[in-house]
Image (spheres, rainbow, N blue to C red):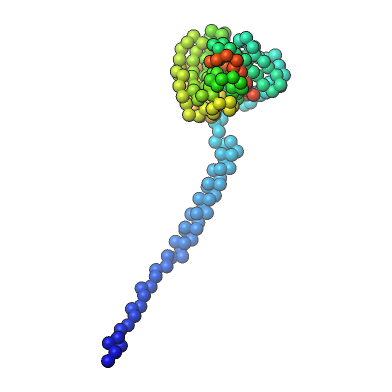
Amino acid sequence: MNQNSNFQIPNPKPQLEPPLWLWRAVRLGFAVLVVVVAGFVIVVASGVADPRPVGSLKWEEKWIVDSGQWVVFGEKVEIGEGKLEIVLERGEIGGAVTRSEGAEYTFEVAGGQADGEIGAAYGIVFGYESPESYIAAMINGNGYVEVVSADGREWMAWQQWPNILLGTEANRLRVDVQGGQGLIRINDEVLMRVPVGDGAIGVIARASADSQRVRFGWAKYWTR
């Protein structure tokens, strides 16, 4: 007698298929996610996410020629051929300022160290009344930043900050002035607020070694 004559192979358990509505929901969700991500990329690329300046653009300076609107201070400031350059020896300070046309404005510049041992401080100056009265926000190619007054007050002591491009890379520095307060940004990232009074706006540099050169490529000014 065959002992296996009664052996039967069990029927496999039926596999459960996900309902059709679930598959459709997953596909729809994925499609929506793709559209949202693509839209976000387009918005960022178009500049919509950038911080809005105060008012409308009044002028853009590329320093092609010396227009005469800039008042320089320091030993050697050169304007023309698409740049404003400040050449400094150790400990020297130089810059250039122009009149601010309103109490509420945005002022932005792009610049960097062009020559010499990396470490020269450079940036924007605002509320400028004289070489002894102004506020300056300055950075250097080693990644440090400070916000100081001409009288020696330190709104932010010299310290490292992560949003600074290093070496000879150009950085953008900006101040948005509203209601007597200036919001300082570096490469669109907020740094801090300081009180701002009347005065001119401009660029500034300070040498940390001999034969350092700082170059600014453009400046923009918005106001109401």
198 or 219: nearer the viewer: 219
Residue 44 appears in the rendering? yes
Residue 105 appears in the rendering? no
84 or 23: nearer the viewer: 84
What residue is at 56 percent from the left and 45 percent from the top?
Answer: 39
Give the quarter of the image for residue 71. top right
Q: In which quarter of the image is the C terminus?
A: top right
What residue is at 56 percent from the left and 47 percent from the top?
Answer: 38
Q: Which residue lies furthest to the bottom in this view?
A: 1
Residue 188 percent across, percent down from the top left: 53, 29
Residue 103 percent across, percent down from the top left: 56, 17
What residue is at 53 percent from the left and 7 percent from the top?
Answer: 132
Task: Name the side, left or right, on which 126 lies relative to 7.
Answer: right
Q: Quadrant of the N terminus?
A: bottom left
What residue is at 45 percent from the left and 15 percent from the top?
Answer: 154
135 or 51: nearer the viewer: 135
Give the vertical position of 36 relative to 178 (above or below).
below
Give the quarter of the image for residue 106. top right
Residue 140 percent across, percent down from the top left: 53, 22
Count of labels shown? Answer: 0
Residue 10 percent across, percent down from the top left: 33, 78
